[in-house]
Amino acid sequence: MTKTTPHFCTIAPDGLRFPLPGGGSILDAALAEGIAVPFSCKRGECGSCRAQVLGGTSERIAPPSEAAYQVADDELLMCQCRATSDLSLRFAHWRMPARPAARYSAKIMALDAVAPGVTKLVVELQSAQPFQCAPGQHAQLLMDNGERRSFSIANLPAETGGANRLEFHIRRIPGGAFTDHKLAELRPGELLEIDGPYGACTWQAPSEPVAHLVLLATGTGFAGISAILKTALTSGAFQTVTLYWGCATAADCYASDWLDEMEDAYAGFRWAAVPSTQRVQNEALAAAHDWAQTTVYACGNPAMVREARELLKAAGLPKDNFFSEAFLPATQAHQDKAPYIVRHPWEKVGAAFSLEGILDARRRSMDALPQIAALMVPGMTTGEASRSPTSICAAWARPTTGTRPTCASARTRSAPRANRWTASGNCAPTTCSPSTWAPCGTATKGTTATPS
């Protein structure tokens, strides 16, 4: 019986080499050997594990789906291919981390409702060794059943000093095992297991002069963008930095106050909230940026990431100047009829009819009040809020008094900054000088917005 000789993969330029067992994907083989490689969704949609083929051959394990990331002729997706010979690969969009990913025990320090259906989770790693990550990377939270959920690290851990704290922005996904179930049970002081850091959509200091930086985010994709934004502003590497943040309602722009402060502190920074009736990539394109001299980071909705890549490349953006991270829900959440699960801590009463159980239920109910409040807007019942928080659009329909200021207006703070929606694409941050900038667009009273 002839014994099959295994193939090997070599990663350039570091020279790392690992075996490629027959049948499995190249990505699975790398992870099994503990090799640090970029990856995220593991189903061929995000493009994080794309690699340039320097030598060798491979084949797809399964046909690509409609949502598949489109690779170049000399590239492959490690999660979707297996080797048919020895391979030599290179990652043009990713650099080997100085320290590999590791598992940490993390103490929950805070659970704050910052927007309808969005929780800010702050944890402190129980390790004396400083946590090192690149701005834009994510960590994986381990669940009791061994499953993992990936969330972007929204802060710069180095800024917390010896505290070693990480911040995550987590949106509730109906039916989600973690976001719709486990998250509601967590309490400050409890411990979580975290693995990381991972991710290829990271801050890259420009090796050649690039004048402008454009950041695109939808929903909690802002978490991955925020660390990149902080680093870019403090680096002074760009003449202008512009953020387009797609949100369903004004309340979903949960970092608007901080962004306004950054806008005042850095003359070259502008940001715009884009309602879900518009598309962040279209707003950016309409602003007529000098795309040949621009770097773009995009985080959030996979459709936005795909369309932004194609639109901006066609407008003149260099291929290597586009970095992205697509946010893909876990497959369990994609069920038309998910079984009912306990969604909030106030639905669990513990040991009923005992003094201990009653007091415990009372404590958990009080702890849950901020979460309840975050799901409510004037005119809604608590039942409506808990059943469908992502459809809450009353904040978008708040009374308005005529047209909000446009770029042609003199700079003014008389209009609430939370209402800085872009609406037509004719008015965008970089078309204004710092002295004339004011919130863009108009909003129509009673408009219903849905998440993009």
Image (cartoon, rainbow, N blue to C red):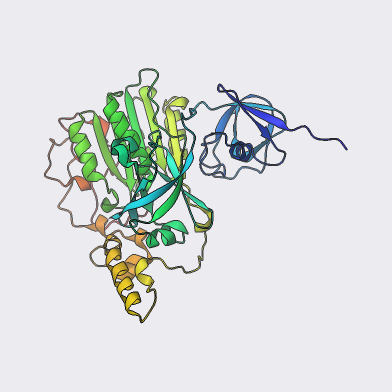
Q: 285 and 325: which one is in front?
A: 325
In this orientation, does residue 287 appear? no
List x then y, in percent, for residue 16: 59, 26
Q: Quadrant of residue 232?
A: top left
Q: Residue at x 33, y 72 (%)?
A: 361
Q: Quadrant of residue 246?
A: top left
**Viewport quadrant of the N terminus:** top right
Q: 74 and 357: which one is in front?
A: 357
Q: Name above or below for residue 18 compared with residue 390.
A: above
Q: Residue at x 57, y 37 (%)?
A: 34
List x then y, in percent, for residue 400: 17, 54
Q: Which residue is the extreme one toward the top?
A: 208
List x then y, in percent, for residue 152: 40, 43
List x then y, in percent, for residue 209: 35, 18
Q: 306 and 44: which one is in front?
A: 44
Q: Which residue is the extreme one toward the front?
A: 128
Q: Name above or below for residue 193 compared with residue 437.
A: below
